[in-house]
Amino acid sequence: MTPHRRATRNKVNEFVTRVSAELERRGHEVLVLGSGDPVKKTLASTPFDIVHVHEPFAPRISSTALRHSYSLNVATFHAPQERVLSTQVARPLVEIFFGRLDARTVTSAATGELLERYFPGPYEVVGPEQAREGGWAEVAGELEAIYRRIAARRHDGSGDAEARRRIVERPLIEVDLHMHTDHSPDCATPVEVLLETARDRGLGAIAITDHNEVSGALEAREIAERMGDIKVIVAEEVKTAEQGEVIGLFLEERIPRGMSMSETIAGIRRQGGLVYVPHPFDRFHSVPDYEHLLDIVEEIDVLEVFNPRVAVTAFNEEAERFARKYRIVPGAGSDSHVAQGLGSVRVRIHDFDGPQEFLEAMRDADITRKHRNLVYVQALKLLQTTGRPKAAKRRVPDARPVRGGRPRRKRSASKS
């Protein structure tokens, strides 16, 4: 992507033309788009491996490309001059688009130093200096190595053929993969009430993901085994030291909070669990930033692409974009802190037994949203938990499913 018309002669277009020719000589298919070309339409119709944007600060084509790309994105920054509009006035917006970059290159060390001041991150120098010393083939070779490096981080979507064979004939069930009980400090829902509500709403399996605790999930699994018609995945939403929260699915023991992300993931793996990243781009939650997500991208088994408690739709869209570009299995959960919100998003999958079959079933998941009034369920959470001491874990011997959280039917106007 060049920000200029392709016929225009300048240093950026020379870079694009020369490198493209070398990449084609190496057997790659390269499409060059410039100002005036149908960028949005092209990105929507062609599954590119790499979208390489030159001068991302440039208006229109560069920002359009980053806005609509679901591919791996590489940027090359050419000009070493500060752009006041981008670095000062529109900096928050620019940071969102820069958050979609999977590799950043600069044509000079001076440009890299300038960018590092305003938008910290790794910048690799690839540019005309190499062309003068080794020719454009050397520049193309360095870029090709970057392309291959980030492409190698995409997940293998082939899955487990044996697990697929086992589950394909099993019935479809609906699951909710993110919820809490009164074993979480910010939830007052007893385990029995949660289970009865889940059964009442037709869920075949639920993952109980209490904050830094598995006792509620273990209790729920024991009760569910007696009930016989709902499956409980024992899970935990763990707060790491500085890199946000991560959920471990299929656990047996509590993982302590406050460790690094890598240590927490190692703890999940030791138990044979799966790594599920919740609300990954919701800036109102404790989430890993983009750089931290890139650090662990190979370790993520399931990425939550829809969470109805995320207030800004764009945050869910960013999660979907990230999952698609790295071919990560998408997931979803209600993140319910009150039983009324349970099942507000459902994942329909084949019934499963254990983490391997579950992960295989999730590859073909159908995610659907059931209407819930977000303001209503958030208000219920505040009423139940805010300003009150943490209640003891309540036992409810005659638990009943809760009502509410569903859309009311409109009454038809009576005829006079």
Image (cartoon, rainbow, N blue to C red):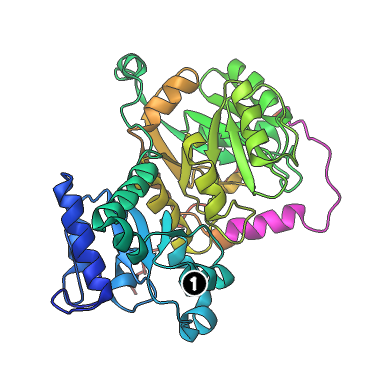
What type is the residue that disc 1 sits on? Ala
Residue at 83 percent across and 46 percent down: it is 390
In this rendered view, identify the residue nearer to me: 378 or 43.
43
Q: How many marks?
A: 1
Q: Is residue 295 magenta?
A: no
Q: Is residue 390 magenta?
A: yes
Residue 336 lies, in percent from the top left, at 59, 46
Residue 312 lies, in percent from the top left, at 50, 64
Q: Looking at the rendering, which quadrant does residue 154 occupy?
A: top left
In this rendered view, identify the residue nearer to me: 332 or 199.
332
In this rendered view, identify the residue nearer to me: 171 or 361.
361
Number of other residues with Cα within 10 Å of mark 1, as a class: few under 14, some 14 to 19, many 20 or more: some
- Could you tell me if residue 1 is visible in this image? no
Residue under numbered circle 1: 110
Instruction: From the viewer's perspective, tell me whether residue 266 is left or right of residue 300.
Output: right
Q: Looking at the rendering, which quadrant does residue 104 occupy?
A: bottom left
Residue at 20 percent across and 62 percent down: it is 18
Residue 136 lies, in percent from the top left, at 25, 58
Query: Looking at this rendering, what residue extends furthest in the right direction?
Result: 389
Residue at 56 percent across and 64 percent down: it is 120
Residue at 38 percent across and 53 percent down: it is 321
Instruction: From the viewer's perspective, tell me whether residue 47 is left or right of residue 214.
Output: left
Q: Which residues are magenta?
A: 376-397
User: What element does badge 1 sit on?
Assistant: helix
